[in-house]
Image (cartoon, rainbow, N blue to C red):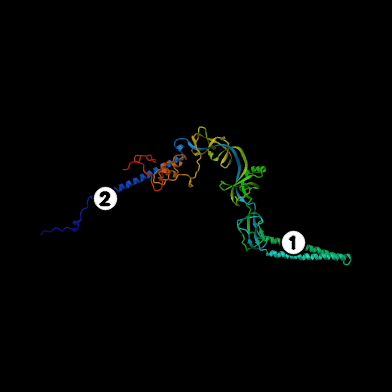
Amino acid sequence: MSESPPPPRPDLAQTTPPSPAAPSRARGWLWFLLIVAIAGGGWYYYDRFKQQSAQAEAQKKAADGKKGIGKGMGGPTPVVAIPARKGRINVYLEGLGTVTPLRTVTVRSRVDGQLMRVHFREGELVEQGQLLAQIDPRPFQVMLKQAEGQLARDQALLANARLDVERYRTLLAQDSIAKQQVDAQEALVRQYEGIVRSDQSQVESARLQLTYARITAPITGRVGLRLVDPGNIVRGGDATGIVVITQLAPIGVLFTVPQDNLPVLLKRQKQDDRLPVEAWDREQKTRLAQGRLLAIDNLVDVATGTVKLKAAFRNEENELFPNQFVNVRLRLDTLEDQTVITQSAVQRGGRGLFVYVVKDDMTVTARPVTLGPADGPRVAVLKGVEPGERVVVDGVDRLREGTRVQLIKRPEFKPSVDGTSGARKKGKGKGKGKGGDAAAKGGPAALEPAGAPARATGGELDAKPPADAAASGEEPAKKKGRRRKPPPEGEESAATGAATPPPP
C-alpha cells in the first residue's frame, strides 16, 4: 500500500518571496535625500558667501566715501585751511577753585527764652538789621521795670541825703552841730550817688536784654534752612543756632596754583594789585563771572606743592553759589603783535610739533613750529609760521609731505524747518531709488554739496510737480495715496534713464 504525500502547510503555501525591486527603491530614496541635503548646503553657503561679499563691498564703498571725493577720484585732497594772523594773546594762570562766601554767620540767641516766632522764609535774601526771630520778651520787660523801680528809690534817697547835707552845713555854720556829723552826711550822699549809678547800669542792662529778645540779621545775605522751630527754648550758649546767613554779593573763590608760578605772580601783584580773574564752569565753556585777585596765602602746601589764592567777585546776578566748583583763570599778562593760529592745526610727530602749510602750488609741507602761550582755541607761534601763511586745520589725517590739496570751506550746521539736522529724509514711496536711503544713512548722497541738483530717490516726498501741473491746479503726484503715471511706451524714465518696456 503506497503512502500519500503530506498535505502542504498553509503558512508556507501563502508566503510569497520578496521582490528584488524593494531594496533598489529604498536606496533610491536615500540617494535622493543625500542629493537634496548637498544641494541645500551648497545653496546655504553660496547665499552666505554672497551676503558677506555684499557687506564687504558696502564697507569698502563707505570707506571710500569717507576718504573724500577728491581722493577717491585720484584728485586733490579737500582740506580746510586758515591763514595765520597777527593778534593779541592773553597769558592766563589756570587753577581749580571753590566758591567760598566772604562772610558766613550762624545766628544765635543772646538770651535764654522761648522762641515765639520766626520772621523769615527759608532760602530768602535778608537785609542787615531785618527782624528774623522773636524771643518771649515778658521776662525781660519785668526785669527792666524792677531795675527802673530800684533806680527811682535810690534817686529819692540821694535827693533826701543832699537836703540833709545842706541843713547840716547851716547848723555847722551856727556852731550847732559837730563837724563830724556833716562829714558823715556828705559821705552818705556820695554813697547814694554810687548806688544810683549802679541802678542806672542795671536799667541799661535790662533794656539791652529786652533788645536781644528781637533777633535781627547781622549781615545781608541768603538764609538757609531753619535749625530751630518756634516754641522751643533757646539759650545763649547753644552751638546750633537758629539759622545760618551766607553773604552772596560780593562772594569769594578759593583756588590753588602750582608753587612754580608764585614768583611771576608776586611780581605781577606788585605791579597791579587788582589782577583780573575769571570764573568758568566745569566744562570751561561758559564764563560765569569776572572779578579781581584779593589775596595770596602766606605759605605753600607741602602735601600738594600749591599755594592758595583768593579772588572776589561782585556776583550781582548770583552767577556763583557757595561751594560751587569752578575753573579759575588769572590773567597775568597780555602779549601784543603775536602770530596766532588755531590749536587744531598743531600736530605731534616723531620730531615734535608741526603744522601743514599750504604752498602756492596747492601742495602741503610739514613745518616744525615752536609754540607760545595759548588763549582758548588760539595759540601763539614763536617760530615756524609767518603771518598770512595758510595752515590746515581740518583734513590733516589724509595728508603727507607734498600732497596736493583743494581748499574748501568748513561745513556749517544748518537746521531744517522741522528742527532736524538738515539731512534729507528717506522717501516714503514705494520707489527703489537709492538717494533717499543714502541720505538717511549718511552715504554718498548725504555728501552732495548744497548747490547740487537733487537726485531722484524714488520716494514720494522727493518728487516735485511740474510747473504746468501746478499752474493748472492738478494734484501733484507726491500726495499720499496716489502714484505717478507710468511714462508712455518706449520713453525713458526721468528717474532711472532706462526705457520703459511696453506691457505684454
In the foreground, 423 or 367: 423
- The residues tagged by marks 2 and 1 sit, at their Cα atoms, a distance apart of 130 Å
Label 2 crowd (10 A; few <14 / some 14-19 / many >=20): few
Residue 413 placed where, x, y %? Answer: 50, 43
Q: Vertical placement of 111 versus 437: above or below? A: below
Residue 177 placed where, x, y %? Answer: 87, 67
Tag nearer the camera, 2 or 1: 1
Q: Which residue is mark 2?
A: 26
Q: Which residue type does callout 1 highlight?
A: Ser
Disc 2 or 1, which lies upstream in sequence? Answer: 2
Using the rendered image of the protein, determine whether residue 463 is visible from the camera's viewpoint: no
Q: Vertical placement of 196 versus 40: above or below? A: below
Residue 144 placed where, x, y %? Answer: 71, 64
Element carrying mark 1: helix
Looking at the image, which residue sits at the far front? 472
Label 1 crowd (10 A; few <14 / some 14-19 / many >=20): some
Q: Which residue is mark 1?
A: 201
Q: Is residue 196 left or right of residue 226?
A: right
Looking at the image, which residue sits at the far left? 1
Q: Vertical placement of 134 versus 452: above or below? A: below
Residue 359 placed where, x, y %? Answer: 52, 33
Q: Which residue type does callout 2 highlight?
A: Ala
Q: Vertical placement of 244 versus 86: above or below? A: below
Looking at the image, which residue sits at the far right? 175
Contact, CB < 8 Å: mark 2 with mark 1? no
Residue at horizontal 36 percent and vertical 45 percent from the top: 47
Q: Quadrant of the N terminus?
A: bottom left
In the foreground, 487 or 496: 487
Q: Quadrant of the C terminus?
A: top left
